[in-house]
Amino acid sequence: MSNQPDNEETRKEAAFAAEHLAAESMAADMDPWVVFDARKTPRAEFEEWLQTYQPSRVSRFGDPERNAEPVGWIAVYGPSFCPDGGDVVGLQDDWERLQMSGRHVTFDTVRELALNRRVLTGKWLMHLDSGFKVDHAWRGVAQAVLDGRIGVAKVSPCCPDSDRKQVICVYTEDFTNEEQVLAADAVIRSTGVKCHLSYKPDVYTYLGIYRDNRWHLCPTIYESRFDLECIPRRSRIINKVTNTEVT
């Protein structure tokens, strides 16, 4: 008996899951953000800001009874943060043409598009339980941004009445620069974060490529696991494109 219908159904479900994640991400980006901008806000105000906007206490969807608006992200911009997202519109146009051409889509073709349009930012992702874990990790990461050791980072607000984990994103300027990606991991680990990390180029986000996508692309290109048995303790980072350990 052929399993073709099952395979077709699985593909449809995977495509729906990827598109759902893309829609959720776009909605969060469009809603208001809570931002501490170290380029223009005095450091003396940072501690109060951090306490006021603890990730586990800020609701993603707001609170109509308290006149609280939805919050897409909570973010810290470092003292030397200089946003440069490249030509995202041009990238998306190129992506449409690529798909119409019938060319096989691989990591290398996506990387080529990103380089051509200078859409090179990427981020280390950590998914943490809401409550003390996410608040504690965010405090360390946010402080590293304030100190200029990281350019920018953000954290998702909580979803009350949900067991969904919250995510912290720590950005780098160039996902093709492996040394830069590894250096950011080292800064994250120096703040005390020991959980599993994954690294995703922003080009995948802009093109709506999430897990379980129709092109069978893995949108995370590095994985970092903290080795507690190694002395000195350090991350073991795998390049998922080449399937090699890089640390």
Image (spheres, helix red, strand yellow):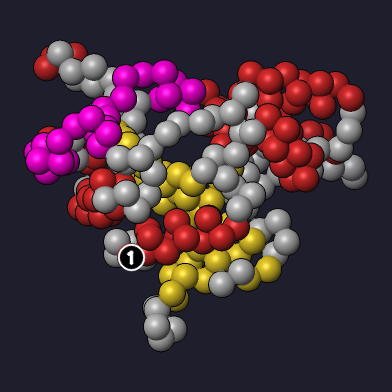
Camera-side residue of 147 and 215: 147
Residue 197 colored in magenta in the image: no
Q: List x then y, in percent, for residue 40.
A: 23, 30
The number of discs equals 1
Q: List x then y, in percent, for residue 193.
A: 33, 61
Residue at 27 percent across and 34 percent down: it is 39
Q: Residue 46: which quarter of the image?
A: top left
> In the rendered structure, which segment of residues is drawn in magenta?
24-51
Question: From what the image shows, is residue 57 above or below residue 198?
Answer: above
Q: Note whether residue 232 is visible.
A: yes
Camera-side residue of 223 and 6: 223
Residue 39 colored in magenta in the image: yes
Q: Is residue 179 left or right of residue 12?
A: left
Q: Residue 63: which quarter of the image?
A: top left
**Residue at mark 1:** 190
For the N terminus, the image quarter is: top right
Q: List x then y, in percent, for residue 84.
A: 51, 31
Question: From what the image shows, is residue 241 above or below residue 113?
Answer: below
Q: Is residue 23 left or right of residue 115?
A: left
Q: Is residue 166 left or right of residue 86?
A: left
The residue tagged with tag 1: helix, strand or loop?
A: helix
Residue at 32 percent across and 41 percent down: it is 78
Residue at 11 percent across and 37 percent down: it is 45
Question: From what the image shows, is residue 34 above or below residue 212?
Answer: above
Residue at 47 percent across and 60 percent down: it is 183
